[in-house]
Image: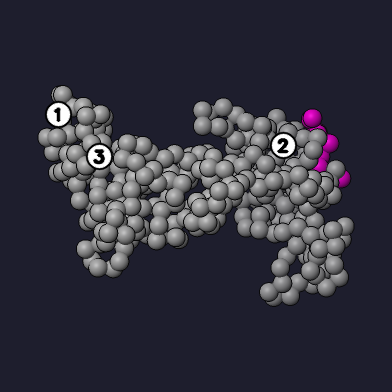
Amino acid sequence: VPLLHVSDKRVLNMTDSDGHFTDWQQLLVNYCFSHDESSLMLCPTTNAILINHCSERMKNCPTFDGKPNAAYQWAGENWDPRTQIWLNKTIDELAQQQERLLALEIVATQDIQPGDEVFMDYGPEWEAAWRHHMQHWKSPPIISDTEKTDNDDSIPSAAKDSAYFSVSEANRNDTVPLPQLVSNSIREEKDHPHIFTACLYWPTKLDHDPVFHNTQGVDFDAMDDIELVNQYGDNGSFYRGDYSQQGDGSYWPCSVLFQENNTHSEEGDGEIQYLVRISQHHLHNSQPWDENELPRFLYHYPRASIRYFVKPYESDVFLKDAFRHPIHVPSKLWPEQWRNL
């Protein structure tokens, strides 16, 4: 098991959207080895990270004798002679090197048959951390049945609008958009703390229509909704394509404003269509309507071209209360000079 050494495990703390370090660590630490009295973190670079934990203490080993069927130890001279050399070095000396210096060996402690899962003991410290996590962790508000909750008056509207949704589940439901992200108003856009809506879009000559260059005498308040859509909207029914075949930047931020009444796709497949508003994509050249702060509406827009994505720094790996704890290396294996805390 080749190991990458991180001399100061604080560098594995995550940053917020402003680039400031936080107090919670990346989930990567769950796959690394360390010691409570050391700043050093050792992270495997192979699929050894897939070896799960079990122990006699927790009585959760599915092996025939209820014990882990493997254990780890420092690599010997026959396999990786450098490990024995660097075990005698200080953390400062390790920090000066950018190449891999250390390795572990995973050894069987009993016969392992083809098809058997390999287990090893992460240590009592890890188990204590896991028990504490299980006793105190609370999941974020999750509402999976959006149609039910939208009509459930027992759930505060603020909770509905900010509930944690699985983006994959939302995208599997290709019949209606999330009610929490449909504004039902041409002059308002819905925002969600965790996810955002995006629409398949590519600029055409319509984006350069003179109407998007003229801002003189425009009074939005004096225009009704139909006038706004007629002036700044186009038929969006041709924006179709297989999501799996799209490249980066194919989906532009958008807002779903309305479900259109009594309109279905021209293909006759019964798909309900929507009025959406497109926003500028940061990877593409700024469009005239964006530069002049004008709306870009598309009507007859197909539901299949609406997708949901996780906002930056809002995926589940950024949940502050997610379990994060390295595999604890016993003191008898951890060199004394590495205990610097």
Above or below for 338 versus 48: above
Please give the range of residues in magenta: 332-341
- Name the mark on residue 263: none
Residue at figure coordinates x 51%, y 52% from the top left: 151
Kindly report the secondary structure that dominates the magenta region of the rendered protein.
Answer: loop
- Label 2: few (<14), some or many (≥20) within 10 Å? many
Q: Position of residue 272 (x, y in %)?
A: 32, 59
Which residue occupies the extreme left position in the image? Answer: 210
- Image location of residue 60, percent across then percent down: 81, 63
Q: Earlier in the sequence, mark 2 or mark 3?
A: 2
Query: Is 179 drawn above or below residue 24 in the view shown?
Result: below
State the CA–CA distance, disc 2 to disc 1.
61 Å
Identify the residue shown where x is 39% and y is 61%.
Answer: 175
- In the picture as drawn, the residue positioned furthest to the top comes out as 217
Specify whether 211 is left or right of 179: left
* Label 1 sits on residue: 214
Query: Depth check: 7 or 206 in front?
Result: 206
Query: Under tag 2, what secondary structure?
Result: loop
Q: CA distance from mark 3 to mark 1?
A: 19 Å
The residue type indicated by label 2 comes to Leu
For mark 3, what is the residue? 225
- Of labels 2 and 1, earlier in sequence is 2
